Image: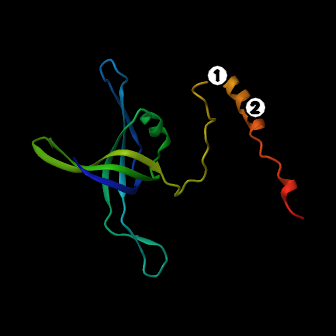
Amino acid sequence: MGTSVDWEGNIGSAPEFKEFANGNKDPRRLLRLNVYFDNSIPKSDGTGFEDRGGFWANVEFWHKDAEHYANLYQKGMRVLIQGRAIIDNWTKEGKEFSALKVQASRVAILPHRVEAVQLAPSQSYNQPQSDQQHTDQSSTQNNAAPDFDDDIPV
């Protein structure tokens, strides 16, 4: 079943995207990350932090937008991972191995080392683009703030 986790760490290598056939349904999409979860403790002299016993873990994030996330996330990026930690066991060439793996339900970018954010234009899924622009302009005009200047005592 796994233990619920809420950990911060740094992506240690380029994200990996895989797509798996799912019968007649849409393919299943997987984003794999290798993340170093540090244990940063403030230094006693107040000059920063020191790492005390961090660890590496593989993170699996099954999501319909996994390919987009694989292009967005980069090595070195600080992320918040929420999900379940489990022990992944396997056998290779007769030897048994195990490693910590996180089955993520959420992966969020943290703003450390981020210099800029650029958003794509918003789109409505219910209206064509030209109708949306007209609706946005008319709703802005209809929802203008009322003029309360007369109510301010002088």
Residue position marked by numbered label 2 in the rendering: 138
Where 17 sits versus 50, above or below?
above
Where 72 sits versus 133, above or below?
below
Q: Amino acid at mark 1?
A: Pro
Outermost bottom residue: 45
Instruction: Please give the name of the residue rendered at 76% of the width and 36% of the height, measured from the top-left corner.
Output: 142
Residue position marked by numbered label 1 in the rendering: 128
- Image location (x, y in percent) of residue 14: 42, 44
Of the two numbered discs 2 and 1 in the rendering, the one whose residue sits closer to the viewer: 2
Q: Amino acid at mark 2?
A: Ser
* Quadrant hosting residue 130: top right
- Image location (x, y in percent) of residue 60: 33, 42
Where 153 sits versus 84, above or below?
below
Q: Earlier in the sequence, mark 2 or mark 1?
A: 1
Closest to the observer, 62 or 150: 150
Outermost left residue: 94
Instruction: Please give the name of the residue rendered at 39% of the width and 48% of the height, measured from the top-left corner.
Output: 13
Instruction: Please give the name of the residue rendered at 12% of the width and 46% of the height, measured from the top-left corner.
Output: 96
Query: Which element type, helix, strand or loop, lies under badge 2?
Result: helix
- Image location (x, y in percent) of residue 73: 47, 44
The local crowd at label 1, few if under 14, some if 14 to 19, many if 20 or more residues have their Cα within 10 Å, is: few
Label 2 to label 1: alpha-carbon separation: 16 Å
Where 139 sits versus 82, above or below?
above
- Image location (x, y in percent) of residue 28: 35, 29
Q: Is residue 23 left or right of residue 139?
A: left
Query: Which element type, helix, strand or loop, lies under badge 1?
Result: loop
* Quadrant hosting residue 151: bottom right
